[in-house]
Amino acid sequence: MKTFPTSAAWCFGILFISVSLITTVSSEVQVVGPADKVVALAGDDVILPCSLKPSVNAEGMIVEWTELNQKAANVHLYRDRRDSYEGQLPSYKGRTSMFKEELKNGNVSLKLTRVTLSDAGRYRCFLPKLNSQVKETTVQLFVDSFSHS
Ligand SMILES: *[C@@H]1O[C@H](CO)[C@@H](O)[C@H](O)[C@H]1NC(C)=O
């Protein structure tokens, strides 16, 4: 009885599985947040970073920005290639926007203007239709009050 063919088959099998795992994992698009914490001064504008890595065009995707501290309430929604303010928290009205020119580069960052102290918290950037294991990231926003000293 020769055991060689069996072990060779196992070796090839394991090698094949490993290689396919590595290639699927590395080629898969991921939603990536900021490397550092995001700090804003009350009254200023701030960008909550979120992008797709490797970059793929996000113009036709759905992007949901929600506030996790407020039961995942809607902060900004982008779908059907435009902004939707359906169900948006009133406190964010007229203060949110996305960078339309950046969407094609996979940059789905949110711009929040006239930041208030109560904006501090955790924001979720979620792309429900993204064909990936990693469809979301969380961005923590810290807000400093203006000091007159
Ligand atoms: C996304 O776009 C904004 C606005 O132009 C820019 O400030 C930010 O650096 C961009 N992020 C990435 C990851 O390119």
Image: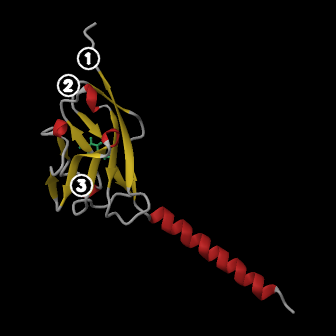
Question: In the figure, residue 28 lies in which quadrant?
Answer: bottom left
Note whether residue 43 is visible.
yes
x then y, percent, for residue 75: 23, 44
x then y, percent, for residue 76: 21, 47
Note whether residue 108 is visible.
no
* Residue farthest along the top direction in this orientation: 149
Asked if the residue under mark 2 is in contact with the one under mark 1, i.e. CB atoms within 8 Å, the reply is yes
According to the picture, the residue beneath numbered tag 2 turns out to be 43
The residue drawn where x is 80% and y is 86% is 4
Q: How many C-alpha atoms fall within 10 Å of the one at disc 2: few (<14), some, or many (≥20)?
A: some
The kind of residue on which mark 3 rests is: Leu
The residue drawn where x is 16% and y is 39% is 90
Mark 3 secondary-structure assignment: helix
The residue drawn where x is 21% and y is 27% is 44
Name the side, left or right, on which 132 lies relative to 57.
right
According to the picture, the residue beneath numbered tag 1 turns out to be 146
Mark 1 secondary-structure assignment: loop
